[in-house]
Image: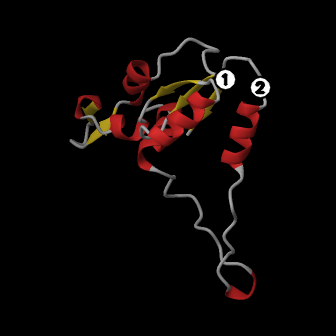
Amino acid sequence: MSSSGNNLMRWFRGADSSQAKPQEGAKGAPRTRRTCIGLGEFMRNLSGCGEQKLCVLDLGPTSPTNITLLTELGVRVFNEDVLRESQDSSYAVVQEDGSTQIDPARFFAENMDYPAGQFDAVLF
């Protein structure tokens, strides 16, 4: 598989196992948890677009809360549950060693074939 194919496979397997594990903080103490402000910034940017009709691609599981929140802002929402769909056995191909692996090119061609520029934002 090409290096780009290997990068795509990380979508389905999680982080590369060769990546370093998080290190402990100073003097062996566990690292402090940090609150992510990304979703707040995402929503602030969407709501700051005024009357402009936006289109968002949500790549997580279908969430009635997300859909309601976004549609109340006047946003068109498309939903693709990437993790669930990637488990579909129809995307599995048998490798030379007999193991099976998801065919990322086929998966993306069948599930993520949208025109360029269709989405103003992606929620993942």
Label 1 residue SS: loop
Crowding near the residue tagged with mark 1, few <14, some 14–19, many ≥20 C-alpha atoms within 10 Å:
few
Which residue matches tag 2? 49
Residue shown at the point (44%, 25%) measured from the top left? 108
Image coords of residue 58 (percent x, y):
52, 33
The image quadrant of residue 54 is: top right
* Amino acid type indicated by mark 2: Cys
Image: 4 above or below 40: above
Q: Quadrant of the N terminus?
A: top left
The image quadrant of residue 42 is: top right
Q: Residue furthest bottom?
A: 27
* Amino acid type indicated by mark 1: Asp
Q: Quadrant of the C terminus?
A: top right
Q: Which label's residue is closer to the chain start, 2 or 1?
A: 2
Label 2 residue SS: loop
Residue shown at the point (73%, 17%) measured from the top left? 52
Relative to 73, 41 lies left or right:
right
How many marks can you see? 2
Colour scheme used in the picture? Answer: secondary structure
Which residue matches tag 1? 120
Crowding near the residue tagged with mark 2, few <14, some 14–19, many ≥20 C-alpha atoms within 10 Å:
few
The image quadrant of residue 105 is: top left
- Callout in the foreground (2, 1): 2
Relative to 28, 11 lies left or right:
left
> How far, Cα to Cα, is label 2 from label 1?
11 Å
Contact, mark 2 vs mark 1 (Cβ under 8 Å): yes
Image coords of residue 21 (percent x, y):
58, 67
Relative to 101, 47 lies left or right:
right
